Amino acid sequence: MDEETLKSALVFFRSDRTSYGEFRKGRKPDYLRKSDRSYSQFFRDFLLPNFPCILSPEFTEGWRSRQEWVKGDGKPDFEHLLKHFGDFVVPVANCDVKEYNANPKHNIPLRDYLNYWREHRESGYSSPQGCLYMKDWHMHRVFPDHGVYSTPLFFQSDWLNEYWDSIQLDDYRFVYMGPKGSWTPFHADVFRSYSWSANICGRKKWLLFPPGEEEHLKDHSGNLIYDVQSPVLQDKNRYPKYSQCCQPIEVVQDAGEVIFVPSSWHHQVYNLELMAVQEEIREWKNHMEGWNQHCQLLLKSCTGINYNEFYTFLKIIAKNRIAVLEATSGDSAAFHRTYPAELSTLGVCHSVFDLHQTEDVLTSMLTNENFSMLDSDLLDPRPEDLLDEIKEIKDAVSS
């Protein structure tokens, strides 16, 4: 990121937020070739305003997965996949079954799934087992040195995976494989983060809705629709706001292309045959012992993260950005030995921008009544001390 983009970004977050009016009227996502944008331009034109886009196959043409996982006719190379990954257990969802607004999953060896896929295709895309979709396989966690794909430069500032990699517990890098007809119900991505998804082979159809449109796709009880193409939406008594909803933005993603899905853009996805890589009671308060601890348990259960963990997440991002800035005026060799290579690509301006954002979030958390009730002994360093450290390094860089 260059200095001009940093300045405009900091101003952007202190002004009115993005309008999605053009997308509600039918604007299609921009299609980008590799020479179309620098990182700073991409940051300014898509990351900041939260706009989707499609990256051309040029961005993935050097990936080993595109060369080794696909046969000359463009179909999946099952033999290669069986040889290298057949014995590994993967999660499989049944797209024909609805369970709590999602598809139930079970785990099976990849070889069993690929055998199912072949039989399903040879039987005219039908099976007594239903339509099974291998999804959310944490391949990177099992094979961290796989080398079958690399994160495009535009998406290397990835706070969530940076956090998970630091504590070595989880990640949000997934591999998907599914036959024609497999699909993912209507949803927004984990923690309302942005995501990117690359097709190794085959095609996918995306139905995208700008942030805010999901409010028109809830029933009278506030429950989000499971399938945005279901005729049940026409029931005005059940879905009273549906008539106010815009039409979905439809995108067909071809082999090699990468789609950028920004934060809080709800979507529904259909596979037209693919393999893909993708990187979500006041009256008791004064009388219930351990109220705040119970709230943290509920928060963890409902969202996947509680206040303690979220503070650790912010701390890791801030400490890493401080390390980048200190390395620019100190021992850069030691930095490269200690931190992931992706961090060195961020540069000074992007690190400063990220520190501004962590400072804003941390400042907001310190004014939150529930956060202030946490046991401060569990937070190291104290949030106030981390905030002072962030401000100190920002002042040093700007001086």
Image (spheres, rainbow, N blue to C red):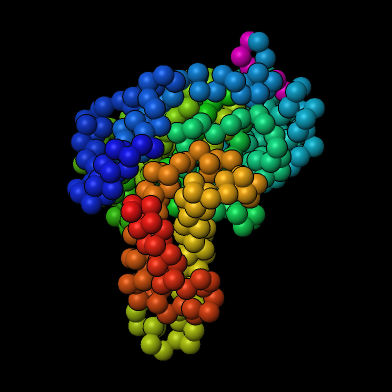
Quadrant position of residue 34? top left
Q: Quadrant of the N terminus?
A: top left
Q: Residue at x 29, y 55 (%)?
A: 220
In this picture, residue 162 sits left or right of residue 187: right
Quadrant position of residue 24? top left
Q: Is residue 245 above or below residue 35?
A: below
The x and y percentages for residue 331 are: 58, 49
Q: Quadrant of the C terminus?
A: bottom left
**Which segment is the magenta one?**
73-78
The x and y percentages for residue 62 are: 59, 20
Quadrant position of residue 363? bottom left
The x and y percentages for residue 83 are: 80, 27
Tell which residue pokes out farthest to the top in this image.
73
The x and y percentages for residue 388 are: 40, 67
How many numbered circles does the render carry?
0
In this picture, residue 214 sits left or right of residue 294: left
Q: Residue at x 57, y 45 (%)?
A: 332
Q: Is residue 44 above or below residue 98?
A: above
Residue 287 among those drawn in magenta: no
Residue 327 can be seen in this image: yes
Q: Nearer the viewer, residue 98 or 387?
A: 387
Decide whether the magenta segment is chiefly helix, strand or loop. loop
Residue 98 can be seen in this image: no
Q: Residue at x 36, y 71 (%)?
A: 366
Residue 76 among those drawn in magenta: yes
Q: Residue at x 26, y 41 (%)?
A: 8
